[in-house]
Amino acid sequence: GQNIDQPTEMTATEGAIVQINCTYQTSGFNGLFWYQQHAGEAPTFLSYNVLDGLEEKGRFSSFLSRSKGYSYLLLKELQMKDSASYLCAVERTDKLIFGTGTRLQVFP
Amino acid sequence: DTEVTQTPKHLVMGMTNKKSLKCEQHMGHRAMYWYKQKAKKPPELMFVYSYEKLSINESVPSRFSPECPNSSLLNLHLHALQPEDSALYLCASSQDTATGLNTEAFFGQGTRLTVV
């Protein structure tokens, strides 16, 4: 089996920084994805980590620690359009499994 | 072309109806997936096709029947559904099933299904 946990909801202010955590327990771990999903839309790819460490991509960064079963997504200079659900997804050897998802609301 | 196209976008069906959801990609991806997503919940994996063969069925009830006619198409046949099956059905594709490489999954816009 597997557990992939994220906080259910988070709020932040425009221009601020927010960190969304993801913890996982699974067999056959290959890597970890972060997806963004706006209400009523399809998930879109944000980042992928396979090795320990930080991957930076513009305003978004993602960190992975394989030994701790832990990842986070860091969003800087928050914008109103960043209000969405953020899904971490564990890539196993056989399939992609999504975490519980975090709904982020950005306020002006 | 990095699109996964799903049709229809919306579907309302009765519990005695038979309908099909369709998914198409032309990225040469050999893995295709069906996910079910209820409101405010993450996508839940239903089926995985790898090289046009069903490789994973996540204990999905038989009223959902997947079909992969060729490497670009994936169908989900629906029969005798229940109101609790109402959800957003997402199709996705990736280069291959996870092999330790970056196998980013591309998602379609989904079919919003309502069973009445």
Image: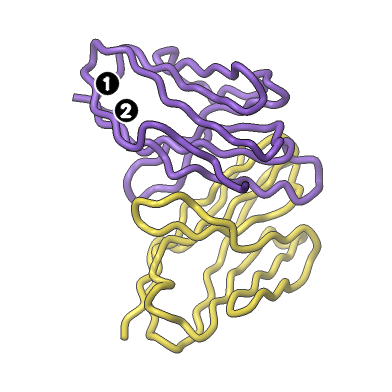
- Residue name at image x 53 percent, y 75 percent: A19
Q: CA distance from mark 1 to mark 2?
A: 5 Å
Name which residue lies at 81% across and 46% down: B100
- Contact between labelled residues 2 and 1, with CB atoms less than 8 Å apart: yes
Indicate the chain coloured yellow by its letter: A
Q: In the rendered image, which residue does mark 1 sit on?
A: B82
Does A34 appear above or below A56?
Answer: above
Say above or below: A56 vs A71: below
Q: Is residue A2 left or right of residue A49?
A: left
Locate residue B15: give its quadrant.
top left
User: In the structure shown, which secondary structural element does the residue marked by tag 1 occupy?
Assistant: loop
x then y, percent, for residue A101: 46, 56
SS of the residue at dot 2?
Answer: helix
- Rendered-image quadrant of the C terminus of chain B: top left
Residue farthest to the front? B1
| Residue A43, horizontal then vertical, whole percent | 49, 52
Residue count near mark 2 (Cα–Cα under 10 Å), binned few <14, some 14–19, many ≥20: some
User: Residue A79 got which mark?
Assistant: none
Residue position marked by numbered label 2 in the rendering: B85
